[in-house]
Image (tube, rainbow, N blue to C red):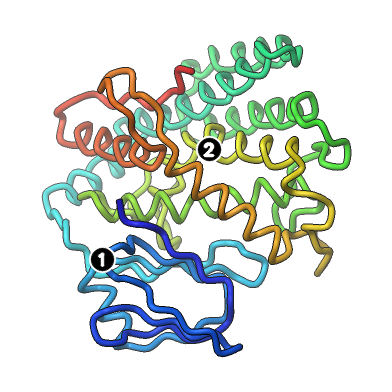
Amino acid sequence: MKRAIYIFSDGELKRKQNTLYFESSSGDKKYIPIENTGEIHLFGEVSINKKLLIFLSQEGILLHFYNYYGFYEGSYYPREHYNSGALILKQSEFYLDNDKRFRLAKKFVKGAILNMIKVLEYYNLRGEDLGREIKNIEEIYESLENFSSIEEIMALEGNVKDIYYRSFNKIIKKENFYYTGRERRPPRDKLNALISYGNSLLYSYVLSEIYKTHLDPRIGFLHATNFRRFSLNLDVSEIFKPIIVDRLIFKLVNKGMIQERHFMDEMGGIFLNENGKKIFVEEMDNKLRATIKHRKLGRHVSYRTLIRMELYKIEKHLISDEEYEPFVMWW
């Protein structure tokens, strides 16, 4: 499997003969084997040139950019090699047909809520007394069928998330990471900083997987296709946030891998500092490469593969091959 490359240092990334070469501003030099590289994440101030971008296009490698605080800013999305005019038309058809779009959008919300319940059930079985929160979310979930617009189901999902995030205080063992309310721009406390950072990373990983399919990342269904460059990755990320990001946060905090010293207070917000970002990214990468035994396939697949499989299911739904059902964690 090709690997993701993470560059935190400032410097220059360029093509050197038929491979990648990075030279940091401090003079460190490193060759990056092109054949093992699936995507590159740039966290530092890195200079690039046209020669590099052409090389990345030829090799089908995405380049993801993050701002000073480590949040996803955008991607260099190479020329698509799996272009399918027929599927783009289908995606557009499903987006423009209100009923078709709503049915698909509701599946993303269903998947997200059911996975939140699964996460809470996991910790409830381990003695965290989350029965009331699970019951409240299940009741809201049951009412999902009564709504008929995307705005309504997004509001409903917001209500579920409020209960869900408040339940974190029964799972997280460090009081200084307790949840007090969701604040994004900027995150005002350490837990919000972790949630925003993890979600931001997940958007880029899902985008990388979309690139390997026939789907067009610009056409989402739950999140409106407007002047935003990509929206399908936001839709699919909703399903995997509880499974990948939230469970990773519990591990990092409860095991003391992320501590007070890994944050900085700037511009009225709380953000991970460089060491904190490195720890989070390394563990996120490990998580995506970790495998589980797939119940239907009968073999081990990675979390990253699960994301790709979800995209294939959406493709099948669009070509009327198979009704899409969102991935729901079974363990």
Q: Is residue 236 left or right of residue 134?
A: left
Amino acid on which the number 2 mark rests in the picture: Ile
Label 2: how many Cα within 10 Å (few below 14, some 14–19, many 20+): some
Residue 35 is marked as 1
- Foreground pick, 317 / 223: 317
Q: Position of residue 30 (x, y in %)?
A: 44, 79
**How far is mark 2 from mark 1, CA to CA?**
27 Å
Reading the image, the residue beneath label 2 is 244
Query: Which of 62/323 is in front?
Result: 62
Q: Is residue 208 left or right of residue 147?
A: left
- In the displayed image of the protein, which residue is found farthest to the right? 175
Residue in front for this viewpoint, 12 or 312? 12
* Label 1 element class: helix
Q: Compared with residue 203, is residue 110 higher up or lower down, i.e. above or below? A: above
The residue lying at 40 percent from left, 69 percent from top is 63
Q: Residue 263, how many percent across, how many down?
A: 79, 59
| Mark sitting on residue 99 | none
Which residue: 16% across, 30% down?
320
Residue at 73% from the left image edge and 64% from the top image edge = 273
Is 306 displayed left or right of 313 in the figure? right
Vertical order, 164 against 144 (above or below): below
To which quarter of the image does residue 223 belong? top left
Q: Amino acid at mark 1?
A: Glu
Question: What secondary structure is marked by label 2?
Answer: helix
